[in-house]
Image (cartoon, rainbow, N blue to C red):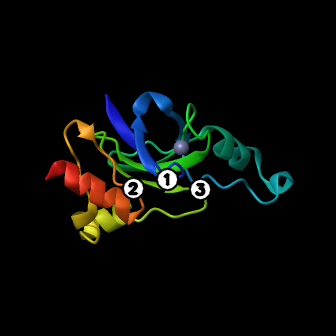
Amino acid sequence: MFHIYCPYCEEHREEEEFHPKGQAHIARPADPDACSDAEWGDYLFFRDNPRGIHHELWVHAVGCRKFFNITRHTVTYAILETYRMGEQPTITAESLASGEKAGNVQAASGGQQTVGASDAAVASVKGAQA
Ligand SMILES: [Zn+2]
């Protein structure tokens, strides 16, 4: 069992309280009637499947029942950050490649694996690993 940081509850909760809902940041076409069948089909059915950093939509189903986003590494399964709807990730494949946020990434083995957006959550994770 591990814990996931909910950015709305602002605390780590058991993984069983959460459900993944697929790729995050999928924008609905502004004018669906102007889309071709291929564009509409791409919006409805096709998702990225990267090896590495992936931004996902999750729901805290047994908690606050709110949707939020997770940045997860698809190879290590490490959850690198969680953030609220409408916010942008601070960790992206591009920023990780440039080493910009490398100091903020923590891949713990077991226990708490997430780094929340708030300073308190970061401090609690760092404290747990000390
Ligand atoms: Zn919650």
Ligand 1 lies under 8 Å from the Cβ of mark 2? no
Q: Which percent across, then down, holds residue 32?
A: 81, 52
Q: Residue 116 carries which label?
A: 2
**Residue drawn 22% across and 66% down?**
103
Q: Is mark 2 on a helix, strand or loop?
A: loop
Q: Is residue 56 above or below residue 15?
A: below
- Residue linked to disc 1: 7
Q: What element carries label 1?
A: loop
Q: Which percent across, then down, holds residue 71?
A: 41, 51
Ligand 1 lies under 8 Å from the Cβ of mark 1? yes
**Residue drawn 59% across and 56% down?**
85
Q: Which percent across, then down, holds residue 94?
A: 35, 65
Task: Give the CA separation, mark 2 to mark 1.
Answer: 7 Å
Q: Is residue 48 above or below residue 88?
A: above
Q: Is residue 38 left or right of 111 when viewed as pictured?
A: right
* Three-letter code, disc 2: Gly
Q: Which percent across, then down, holds residue 42?
A: 64, 45
Q: Residue 71 carries which label?
A: none
- Residue linked to disc 3: 85
Q: How crowded is mark 3: few (under 14 residues within 10 Å), some or many (20 or more)?
A: some
First along the sequence among labels 2 and 1: 1
**Residue drawn 54% across and 51% down?**
8
